[in-house]
Amino acid sequence: MIEVKENKVFEIPKSIKKGAKFPFCPGCDHGVAIKLIAEVMDELGLREKTIGVSSIGCSVMLYDFLDIDCVEAPHGRALAVATGVKRAKPDNFVLTYQGDGDFASIGLAESMHAALRGEKITAICINNTTYGMTGGQGGPTTVMGQVTTTSPTGRNKEYHGYPIKIAEQIALCDGTVYATRCSLDSIPNIRKTKQAIKKAFEIQLEGLGFAFVEILATCPTNWRMSPQKAHQRVRDELFQIYPLGEFKLVNSK
Amino acid sequence: MKQLIKGNYAIAQAAVNAGCDCYFGYPITPQSEIGEYMSKKMPELKRGYVSAESELAAINMVLGACSTGVKAMTSSSSCAVALMQEALSYIASDELPAVLISVMRAGPGLGYIYPSQADYNQATIGGGNGDYKIITLAPSTVQECVDLTYKAFFLAHKYRNPVILLADGLLGQMMAPVEIGKYPYPEISNKDWALEGAKNRQSRAIFSLEPLEENLIKRIDKLFKKYKKIEENEVEFEEYQTQDAELIVVCFGSITRNVKSAVKECRKQGKKVGILRPITLWPFPSKKIEELANKTKKFLVVEMNMGQMLKDVKLAVNGQVRVEFQGKSAGQLIGVEEIVSKIERLIND
């Protein structure tokens, strides 16, 4: 008789709702980002003490996937809502999940001031250089020359201004303990992103201050690209403008 | 024991006594004393306090805190309450127990800090999107500022609905001897809905997004069932000498003081005049006014604005008798003599 030894290579994280259906477009990176968050939550045993704050855009349905308590914030106000949650329940783990438009355009004041106050919150921002849910309009991180439905001849400074480098800006805030930029374009970078999320979670658990993870992600539908080409664009174009790496890490314990 | 205290401080003290767990605010005259008081008191009591970066942030911090079931509030005024309208719509849809102290100043735009009543529409109709309602309480004295702040927290939690305490610059800045006693209402359990982490129970979500039409219909139906219950149970008003009145003055808030003096003066002259003062602006005492319209000959609506509550009175009266208006813009006070002469003219008319 041959003994079969089980070698489990994949399991759906416990922090993902049973039977959850991901409605994201084919090749979209949101699913990967949410799975990484769920895995880290499992590893740190955070599911039962987390209150998540979802934002407006493709990120809004966080509560449909994560099996955690969740509150939806109005557009741009996720970090104000999260501040209210954390101040009311300092012992809970508080997480925001936002897009670049929510975090750095309409919500820039709320985001920066949460960082300046050093709120003990972990903020995760998916930067896909466009407003995905509304159909691919230009946003705060749309790169110069990028064609979108509101920059038909490419982003130019006259009509759209210059893009914002979010992680670098958040790193400038004195209350920020950790600011980093990662990417989901390849397996090694996905692994690094998971490590960054874990670090950002641990910083909150240690009560050190504001922890921020910007994740470069694709929007193949609105970029009019195949998923493979979209990830190639991240490597070829976005890495030059939005370099990966840690912009701030204040010594933790 | 009574203490001589400014309206804004009285409201802040009452909020603390009511067990307000979190205060988030941004300065604006004529309500800044509330935030100043809270910035000292809340940290002393180890309760939540943040000097928010804007009114947008302040009201959304309230949204977040309320989602965990605690008592949370902010305070503001007119042009800044305008900034909070989006969040108030979300809070109403989310069914969260938020308390907003709105100390009116004169508008439109920046206007000025004069004690106007021109935000009746802003409070009762609101500027947020969609079908929703906010319980609105209108104090007419500093003592009522205290009593109705208590009531605001109670009703907010009883119905899981935002409540506005609609004061004005006159009440906020006026000093008066008041009794600030213990919070007189029972505590309401939030165990079955508040977010505190999904421990030993299913996870919960508080949201307003409803992509499925049938769910959005259900949500709004549920809200309006609650609103009907509030309209049936929570209407509050003060009636003064309406029994035999041939003319009834309808007024709310701080101007009631002058209206009362005018009505007393008219009574001395033998004129049959009374007052109906709505205390809840929503739910509005429409039934009471309709009832009075069957007995009286005329109504006079007195407001420190260009005629906002007027339309609610007209709707309630429904053409049965005449409804006249006396109002002033820009927070000008309407003097007792002016009201007396208006009443005299109307009675003889």
Image: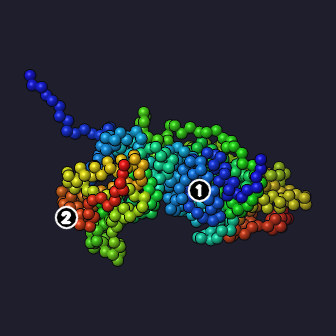
Foreground residue, A19 or A29?
A29
Looking at the picture, how far across and down is residue B109, in whole percent? 58, 70
Badge 2: residue crowd in 10 Å (few <14, some 14–19, many ≥20): few
- Badge 1 marks a residue whose secondary structure is helix
Q: Which residue is mark 1?
A: B39
**Residue at left offset 58%, top offset 44%:** B157
Left or right, B150 with respect to A105, comes to right
Estimate how packed mark 1 is, as few (under 14), some (14 to 19) or many (20 or more) residues with alpha carbons within 10 Å: some
Where in the figure is residue A178, as x and y percent of width and height?
Answer: 35, 56
Looking at the picture, which amino acid does disc 2 mark?
Asp
Query: Which quarter of the figure has residue B27?
Result: bottom right
Image quarter of the C terminus of chain B = bottom right
Q: Amino acid at mark 1?
A: Ser
Residue at horizontal 30 percent and vertical 52 percent from the top: A196
Residue under label 2, please give it.
Answer: A236
Residue B34: percent from left, percent from top: 63, 57
